Amino acid sequence: MTTTRVPIDVQAAQRRAVGTLVTANAVGALGITIGIATASLLATEISGSEEQAGLAQTFQVLGAALMSYLLARVMTRRGRRVGLVTGYLTGAVGAVAVVASGVLGSMLLLLVGAAMFGSSTAANSSARYAATDLAPPETRGRALSTVVWATTIGAVVGPNLTGLSELVAGWLGIPALTGPFALAGAGMLAAALFLAVRLRPDPLLLARELAASTAGPPSTVTATSWGRVGAALRERPVLIAAVAGLSGAHAAMVSVMVMTPLHMQHGGAELRIIGVVISVHVLGMFAFSPVVGWLADRVGRAPVLAAGGGLLVVSLVLCRLSPEGSSWQIFAGLFLLGLGWSLATISASTMIADHAPLESRTDVQGAADLMMGLTAAGAGGLAGVVVGAFGYPTLALVSVGLAALVIGAGVVASRHVTR
């Protein structure tokens, strides 16, 4: 007896996948931003030293970078759904560990928990690639940018739930500063459960199935994950340009963004005004993502990448000229810093989705996000040293070199691609 398989509506599967990823990313980002707002305060309270305040954030960034690659390995074997669910569940466990660190007063447990907490950031980032698995080339930028845009919801709502987190901490009998992480863990768990139920069919596994049905099964690759990444980069140099642009933009953004509150505080800016500047920066990063994705599809990935680098240069010049405290230059500079990052990140990520071979797609994407995270962690760490020795204007000037790298990546990429 033979059975006839019902054909899959690929367009419907793509719409379902994007809708599911948007919802999960919004909920996941909500959990991430709730926790980030108090990580440094909790580290200071536990350690008793302001010098260790940034360690929690540093470990979270490093954890996100490492988990980006590890989750990609899971996705290679089991598909997007299992990888994303694993990422959010690991982040939820990390949130519990952070809460426990506050109860026990353990700095070591806080750092371990923060690193695991970073797994949710890696899952949120990986979701943008999942949106492109079933998308045709002419709409990949829009699909990817729609999922990136969803982060705006969490980024805006998350910090405003601090009051609720205090109530939760009181109900649970835990330190007030761990309340946000309790809420964050619940949000990540909800995102994991939603993906486990709704992300069906798995977009990556379906893409592989469709490719096998039309062109035969992909070639068998026996190399290690890093071997597959290396082979893809050698065969398709445009991927090197895309990874360089992605890393340069992220490093430039992080290095200046993390030191801006200190620059403003030195000039007597109120905490409320500093918060508004950071909110404007986040708005630039995510709110215009759908427009950026449309541009990447219509104008081309490489020109948008180069334009993102150019916008970063303008933003850094404004930051370089901004006086301490509050000024129009710092407002405009931080907004354009976020928008330049958006142009570069979305175009470079779409370029990676375009050119990474199907059999090694998740390996290349995971390696790209790993490089992006490690570069940003290094830039963020060095930013404090540069500002301490030479000042914020010098940091902005030095970061122009990273923006120039992004422009160069766009120029190089344009020589290898037509889109």
Image: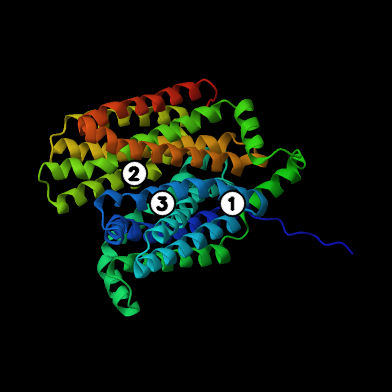
Q: CA distance from mark 3 to mark 2?
A: 20 Å
Q: Residues within 10 Å of mark 1 (few under 14, many from 20)?
A: few
Residue identified by numbered label 3: 60
Quarter-wise, where is residue 197 in the image? bottom right
Which mark lies nearer to you, 3 or 2?
Answer: 3
Q: Looking at this rendering, what residue extends furthest in the left direction?
A: 268
Image position of 83 (left or right of 333): right
Q: Is residue 175 left or right of residue 195?
A: left
Q: Earlier in the sequence, mark 3 or mark 2?
A: 3
Seen in the picture, residue 12 relative to 417 is either above or below; the reply is below
Question: Residue sitting at 58 percent across and 34 percent down?
Answer: 355
Identify the element where label 3 is drawn. Answer: helix
Residue at x-position 71% and y-position 56% = 7
Disc 1, SS: helix
Amino acid type assigned to the residue bearing label 3 in the image? Gln
The answer, for residue 319, to whether it is visible in the render is: no
**Quadrant for the N terminus in the image:** bottom right
Which label belongs to residue 285? 2
